[in-house]
Image (spheres, grey):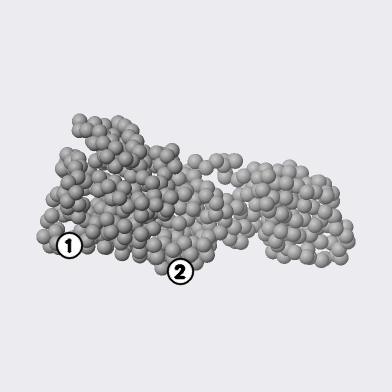
Amino acid sequence: MLLDKILATITRFGMVRPSDRVLVGVSGGADSVTLSHVLTELRGRLEIDIELAHLHHGLRPEADDDEAFCRGLSEQLGLPFTSERVDVESLAARSKRSLEEQGRVSRYRFLAKLAARRDCTRIAVAHTMNDQAETFLMRALRGSGARGLGSMRPVTAERIRPLIELHRDEIVAFLRERELGYRDDPSNNDWRFTRNRLRHDIFPRLGELNPQLVETLARNAEILRDDDDFMDQAARLAFDELASGNLKRGATVTLAVEALGALEIAVKRRVVRRAVEVLRGHTRNLSQRHVEDVLSLLENGKSGREIHLPGLVVARSFDRLSFSLGSGRSRRKSSPNGYSVYEYRLRIPAVLPILERQGLLTADLVGSIRSGDKPPNVAGNAVVVGVEGRAQDLVVRSPRSADRFRALGAPGAKPLARYLMDRKVAKEERQRVPLVVRQGSENRGDDILWVVGHGVAETARLGAGRVHLRLEWVGQ
């Protein structure tokens, strides 16, 4: 019996719970009329409430009669009814969508807003097994991957499809047996719409090769959905192991290049998609080509390269792959050469907030240290340095393009940018790392004492006659 079959589908996929309020989208066609009657008959057993909703698209002269029919159906079933009108043609022109696509977008938007207004917890739509098979074939022709070929899920968030395991022939037989009327939409015969061409031309011809074509394609969609769910879970686990950074939406995501490169290609692609989803909240407009472009950054020799995706920048820096929001091409820089600019005078003792780096630098005098002693730490976030002359002449500033640095024990100085590059510091970080500096004169450049978090200078060696300072960086 058809009711039992639909009830089994509802139960199998957990489509409703007792006390749910279900908003049923009705067009007046055979599928939605069947859905309305069936859910009305099952509502007692399911312990749910039902109401109907219809969207007038304003596309056909018969649309007024469709709306009147749906209103009459609700009165016949004793259900609340809401209808609204939209100008789909104008909306399609503005959004540059096809009429078919804009109609779908407008319907779902209408149902979602109405469900929220009416405190409905589920939205039921009348897609059938035939719709599933048609969607599978349409997406296959467009080159969709496994996720797209999984077609329409029986349950998507609050949206449910109780007829998804029902063949259209079963629906027609049900209506005929019950002598129930429905509206015939002439646009379903309009071959300008891709789905109609498939339905009336391609499917019948393919059906000559496989009489069970609808069932076969719908079953393939279900298998691919299950495979997709498994792969998606594997990718999420891999992402959770690989990702670092601020994983809140709208922040940054960083992946380890070596670990990502070691994954199977199918998982790698999904990890990239997951990174985009975490940042943007969705993966709309992210094509397979975009994903492959990102993965190309894993190749040798790609450090320093970046790729611009819709609303997103992916940059390779040594062993890290960083995802961040923004076009990248228009990112604001504080100076023409890309260096961030800040400078603070360091007064001893000090607890100095460096707002640009969201951290604190503390500085205190320490007791006597024997001549020739090296600082207890020459790298890291806490060091002791020796300063000739007055300790009050120190500043904390950002790097400059002309800066040079001689690390403790090094045979000579080198450009600061090269020193940091040798330490595999990312380009953007090289331009922002704090420096503790003794300011020079017009004829003598600044003397960098400490590259915070990376190294102490040879000129900061401890010894007699020097002021010794304990410096510590605390990131926030």
What residue is rendered at 26% in x and 32% in y? 58
Q: Position of residue 102 (x, y in %)?
A: 30, 39
Q: What's the mark number on residue 212? A: 1
Q: Which labelled disc corresponds to residue 298? A: none
Residue found 14% across the figure and 62% down from its top: 211
Total numbered labels: 2
Comparing labels 2 and 1, the label whose residue is closer to the camera? 1
* Secondary structure under the numbered disc 1 in the rendered image: loop
The kind of residue on which mark 1 rests is Gln
Residue 61 lies left or right of residue 335; in this view the side is: left
Q: Quadrant of residue 65?
A: top left
**Tag of residue 262:** 2
- The percent position of residue 455, horizontal first and vertical second, equals 70, 60
Q: Is 244 in front, or is 350?
A: 244
Q: Residues within 10 Å of mark 1 (few under 14, many from 20)?
A: few
Q: Position of residue 188 (x, y in %)?
A: 18, 43
Looking at the rendering, which quadrant does residue 338 occupy?
A: top right
Element at label 2: loop
Q: How busy is the neighbourhood of tag 2: few (under 14 within 10 Å), some, or many (20 plus)?
A: few
Residue at x 24% of width, y 36% of height: 69
What distance separates the C-alpha of mark 2 from that of mark 1?
Answer: 42 Å
- Amino acid residing under circle 2: Ala
Please say if 72 is above or below 448.
above
Note whether residue 45 is visible: yes
